[in-house]
Image (cartoon, helix red, strand yellow):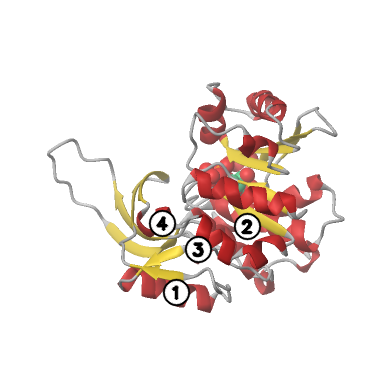
């Protein structure tokens, strides 16, 4: 849930108010956390469905084609609504700041979820984020939870006042450092900090918390094993880390659905690897690897 067209501009610095600066690169791609995660899972071989809305405009039409190319089902829940989706991103070196204009995403509502009930309740895993309205995301999690579907929640973009049921309805609660900081008010700069915030989030009712730490990999902590565990990522030459977290979440959803007997640590190790491949080429979805190009011991 959550899609957008992604316009990226590369500059050496951000403009000041009222200033115009010259950028050195501009490109348009496909983005949105939910769609990115779905694309990564599909490229690993998962059968995926997106519950979303797109604008009835050129962005929406191109996105529809993008879903088809990635063999993502949009089924009955897919509606075209007149509303633009704009996503702007400014890359400064390899850092990025992001502005989201949610557009059609905010129009996904409980009626759409009812129409998609079959897809939600018969899935192996549902992945939700906060790029559609939180109330709709929460309702989707409730529907999935009631049907015994595994829930993977990615609280992004983060909100300090997240509804408490997001924690209790999450089998896996997966956030990055910034999101963990917003949710707990504590700084997260290393695996030790991540363990501390992870235990706070765990106490709010999740079964398992994963805090991703960029090049450092992740920290996981669970009800079953409340001692934080650092799962490092391999050392790679990062070129563009945009969307790494979504590649990670998409890969994790794939392993949860298709390799449920793997240990969580092993799923995280493999998902770290896949996300670390994505940071070695530019772009977001364009950098996500396909199953055929990955070492076969991942499968
Ligand atoms: P987000 O994109 O949400 O900010 P992170 O930056 O924490 O997420 O990255 C998510 C995952 O991507 C990490 O847990 C790791 O597996 C992988 N990753 C990100 N940056 C790097 C990097 N520089 N080197 C290796 N792996 C990386």
Q: Residues within 10 Å of mark 4 (few under 14, many from 20)?
A: some
Mark 1 or mark 4: whose residue is earlier in sequence? 1
Report the residue marked by disc 1: 64
Q: Residues within 10 Å of mark 3 (few under 14, many from 20)?
A: many
- Closest to the camera, between mark 4 and mark 2, is 4
Report the residue marked by disc 2: 250
Q: CA distance from mark 1 to mark 4?
A: 17 Å
Mark 4 or mark 2: whose residue is earlier in sequence? 4
Q: Residues within 10 Å of mark 1 (few under 14, many from 20)?
A: some
For residue 107, which numbered disc appears in the image? 4
Q: CA distance from mark 3 to mark 4?
A: 24 Å
For residue 285, which numbered disc appears in the image? 3
Q: Quadrant of residue 70?
A: bottom right
- Residue beneath the point at 51% across and 73% down: 67
The spot of residue 228 in percent (x, y) is: 76, 29
Q: Is residue 245 above or below residue 76?
A: above
Q: CA distance from mark 4 to mark 2?
A: 23 Å
Q: Is residue 109 above or below residue 46?
A: above
Q: Are marks 1 and 4 in contact (CB under 8 Å)?
A: no
């Amino acid at each position: 849930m959550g899609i957008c067209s992604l316009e990226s501009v590369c500059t050496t610095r951000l403009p000041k108010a009222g200033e115009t600066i010259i950028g050195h690169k501009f490109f348009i791609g496909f983005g949105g956390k939910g769609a990115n995660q779905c694309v990564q899972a599909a490229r690993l071989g998962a059968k995926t469905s997106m519950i979303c809305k797109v604008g009835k405009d050129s962005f929406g039409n191109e996105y529809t084609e993008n879903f088809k190319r990635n063999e993502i089902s949009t089924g009955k829940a897919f509606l075209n609504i007149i509303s633009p989706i704009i996503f702007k991103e400014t890359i400064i070196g390899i850092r990025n700041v992001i502005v989201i204009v949610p557009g059609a995403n905010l129009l996904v509502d409980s009626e759409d979820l009812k129409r998609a009930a079959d897809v939600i309740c018969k899935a192996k895993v549902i992945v939700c984020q906060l790029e559609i309205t939180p109330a709709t995301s929460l309702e989707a999690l409730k529907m999935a939870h009631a049907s015994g579907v595994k829930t993977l929640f990615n609280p992004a973009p983060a909100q300090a006042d997240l509804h408490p049921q997001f924690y209790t309805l999450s089998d896996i609660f997966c956030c990055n450092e910034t999101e963990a900081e917003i949710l707990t008010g504590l700084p997260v700069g290393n695996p030790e900090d991540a363990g501390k915030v992870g235990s706070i989030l765990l106490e709010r009712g999740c079964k398992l918390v994963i805090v991703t730490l960029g090049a450092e990999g992740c920290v996981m902590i669970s009800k079953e094993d409340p001692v934080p565990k650092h799962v490092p990522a391999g050392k790679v030459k990062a070129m563009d880390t945009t969307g790494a977290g979504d590649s990670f979440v998409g890969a994790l959803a794939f392993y949860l659905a298709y390799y449920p007997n793997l240990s969580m640590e092993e799923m995280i190790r493999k998902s770290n690897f896949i996300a670390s491949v994505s940071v070695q080429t530019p772009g977001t979805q364009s950098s996500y690897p396909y199953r055929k190009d990955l070492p076969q011991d991942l499968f």
